[in-house]
Image (cartoon, rainbow, N blue to C red):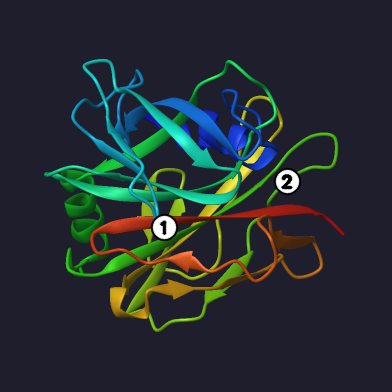
Amino acid sequence: MRIRTRLLGILWCSVAAAACGGGDGNASTVTGVVYSWEESDVAITVAGVSVGVFGTQISDTSDADGRFVLENVPNGDVFLTTARNGYWGVVDYYTVPLQTSGREIGLSIVPDGEIVRWEGVLQRSIPATEGAVDIIYFGGPPDGGPQDGETGAISASSDDEFTFDVWTPMDQTSVIAETLPDGSGFGELVFTSVDPANETITATVTGAPGATQCVVDETPGTQYPIIEKSLTIVYAYCEPL
């Protein structure tokens, strides 16, 4: 079993804006934990990760327990980033201040070995000199969630895209949806080899024909940063037609 904390924990906090500390009215304190995105029966925290607010000098380094504190984060839409040698970073979208004080958020970082595993399964290279985009399709009770066949696009060229069958990358461009025990669901579509020279991209999503409708969950027209050796996350909410 892979512990994908950004799905099982981060996702619901992020899109629901459900975790943040207090602030001075214009800025807030954001606290959280960095987890490794890999095959494991338990959540693995990662120390020594540089966590930052994209486009600012605000940063912290995760401690021995993977915990970090970001002070004076500007209120509004922000992208939080992770980076460390031996890993691919993650770029994750949040709206600050988040609504429930006192809860920690979770951020992810992807071991190089996980990217190597993808390369082996897909039989193609995923260059560390370029970036990648992961569109996460989600939804849950009482309306239902993602279904097989959803897809998407980004406003930049990509050498390839693929989805996941449970946790195994599959060389196809439509989503395979998975239902969790609580009735919620998710699926993923990953675009690799996105040139960081693009600096930013936009994303669009499409529901499964005749079954669902999906929308990008962030502010319409959001420009997502593309960073070398980083996976930029886009959230897409899906519901039945």
Residue 116 as seen in the image, left or right of residue 232: left
Q: Nearer the viewer, residue 211 or 51?
A: 51
* Residue indicated by mark 1: 232
When the figure is inspected, residue 224 is found, relative to residue 143, above or below; the finding is below
Residue 14 as seen in the image, left or right of residue 112: right
Image coordinates of residue 12 in percent, x first then y, are 62, 34
* Element on which disc 2 rests: loop
Quarter of the image for residue 23 reads top right
Label disc, if present, on residue 145 of the rendered structure: 2
Quarter of the image for residue 219 reads bottom right
Q: Residue at x 70, y 52 (%)?
A: 237
Q: Nearer the viewer, residue 80 or 111?
A: 80
Image coordinates of residue 194 in percent, x first then y, are 33, 74
Q: Is residue 1 visible?
A: no
Image coordinates of residue 101 in percent, x first then y, are 63, 19
Mark 1 surroundings: few (<14), some (14-19) or many (≥20) residues within 10 A: many
Outermost residue, bottom side: 157
Q: Nearer the viewer, residue 108 or 161?
A: 108
How many marks do you count on the picture? 2
Q: Spatial distance from mark 1 to mark 2, Cα to Cα?
A: 22 Å
Residue type at numbered disc 2? Gly
Name the quadrant of the N terminus: top left
* Element on which disc 1 rests: strand
Residue type at numbered disc 1? Thr
Between disc 1 and disc 2, the foreground one is 1
Q: Residue at x 68, y 23 (%)?
A: 100
When the figure is inspected, residue 34 is found, relative to residue 166, above or below; the finding is above
Q: Residue at x 80, y 34 (%)?
A: 141
Image coordinates of residue 96 in percent, x first then y, are 60, 40
Q: Is residue 81 visible?
A: yes
Mark 2 surroundings: few (<14), some (14-19) or many (≥20) residues within 10 A: many
Name the quadrant of the C terminus: bottom right
